[in-house]
Amino acid sequence: MVLVDSVTRAGGSVIAHRRSGEQPVGGATVAPTRSPADRATTRPRTGTPPRLAKFHVPEILFGPGSLSEAAHAAVRLGARRPLLVTDPGLCAAGWPTQLGAYLAEAGLVPTVWEGVTPNPKDHEIAAGHVVYREQGCDVIVALGGGSVIDAAKGIALLAGNGGLITDYEGVDRMALPIPPMVMVPSTSGTGADVSQFCIVTDTARNTKITILGRALVPDMSIVDPHLLTTMPDWLNAATGLDALTHGIEAYVSRAHNPLTDHHALQAIALVGEHLERTMDHPAEEAARTCMAQAALEAGLAFTNAILGAAHAMSHQVGGLLDLPHGVINGVLLPHVIRFNAEPDPHRFVPIAQALGLAGDIAPDSDAGAAEAAEWAAVEVRRLADELGVPKGLGEIGVTESDVSVLSAMTLADACLSTNPREADQADIETLFRAAL
Ligand SMILES: NC(=O)c1ccc[n+]([C@@H]2O[C@H](COP(=O)([O-])OP(=O)(O)OC[C@H]3O[C@@H](n4cnc5c(N)ncnc54)[C@H](O)[C@@H]3O)[C@@H](O)[C@H]2O)c1
Ligand SMILES: [Fe+2]
């Protein structure tokens, strides 16, 4: 086992000493990380009363080199003619060719369809569904980032239920079963490979709609950190910030439970320790594996606890301007942390500790907790700065004249319902203006 004693964060003097021997799922050999349990020693003062907790999750295969297992997974799910959904960027990186060969070796006749663009559009899903039917496909295999995986879920949904993808906005709107799905994520961020979410751009309204339903939880997720090595730096940064946003929003969500809390804090700690290292050492397998685990655990947390205002707002900006989801989240997140922590900052203390809060803040008091929450907001912005994320939404094309419409649409987004603090149109407008 490789033991790394310390890591220097890029551009800063933060030295994180790894103490525990905790390993990611799958038992891969990676640099051990401090567990959130080590860091988040202070429990939130206002604990959640015991209540029913549900936790759904696909079968997961995790580890470097696991890509070849996707073919066996498809066979086990009854595939003969799988539809391999991917996109041109992945094709250029070569991964679909490799997976196509594994599928053929397993005796399958795959159809490769690469018609997805980032922030996948409603008409792309309709086109993919036509291909699925024309080719007599039976199982969906997706290889790509969140856009490809969401498009694949959309195709599966239409294959089972018909109609238009925009008919299914909201929660559990599909009535009939959908084809089996094997997901192979190629970015370390979205968690779409384990989630019950499908996010699609409604091109008529220029917004991203959220489709939620447990039927959308894939049958298998195959997480191979090797795939992350061809991500460009901007995508690594953006998707890492997406995973961080998932962890933080899931942890403070109204729908959180002890099972989601564990994964949320673990994801936050892993991003805090390893994202910058993957930027400085892109070929290093250990850090990539930790980021793959971070994205996975963040996905396990948010698919069960749902999200909050940062995502509700981000979906509107992403639909309007077709910009990278994780970058928008990175800009919004510090503002949403401050807004949510204002009435009760205590739940942000374990988040700050998972991110490495120094011991000189005593977070048990109201004032100390407020200080810890502010520290977390500043730390998220520091990380965003290190990664080159724009300071404000204005830099990426949002203007004052967009604020009112973006805010009205945010109020209708399913993710807002689990935000820990009620927010009305005026609150969301204030948040957007602060983030401009
Ligand atoms: N369903 C969910 O639970 C969920 C959660 C969060 C985000 N999302 C959605 O996911 C989408 C964002 O996905 P994303 O950030 O993973 O990026 P993406 O799928 O939009 O991909 C962005 C670009 O990166 C390229 N790319 C991806 N992986 C690569 C690799 N390994 N090597 C080289 N190029 C690669 C793609 O070809 C594409 O051009 C958004 O639409 C967002 O709304 C979904
Ligand atoms: Fe996200």
Image: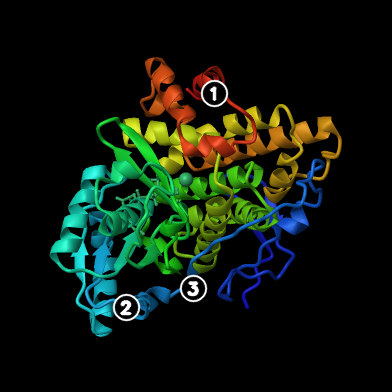
Q: Position of residue 393 (x, y in %)?
A: 44, 27
Up-down: is 354 above or below 202?
below
Give the secondary structure at mark 3.
loop
* Tag 2: amino acid: Gly
Labelled disc at residue 63: 3
Q: Which residue is mark 1?
A: 431
Foreground pick, 219 / 400: 219
Residue wearing tag 2: 78
Tag 3 near tag 1, CB within 8 Å: no
Of marks 3 and 2, which one's residue comes earlier in the chain?
3
Label 3 crowd bin: few (<14), some (14–19), many (20+), radius 10 Å: many
Residue depicted at 54% across the width and 23% down the height: 431
Residue 420, label in figure: none
Could you tell me residue 353's position as x and y percent?
73, 47
Query: In 3D space, how far apart are the residues under numbered discs 3 and 2 (Cα atoms)?
Result: 24 Å
Q: Is residue 70 above or below residue 272?
A: below
Q: Earlier in the sequence, mark 3 or mark 1?
A: 3
Mark 1 secondary-structure assignment: helix
Which residue is at a point 28% across and 79% down the rendered structure image?
A: 102
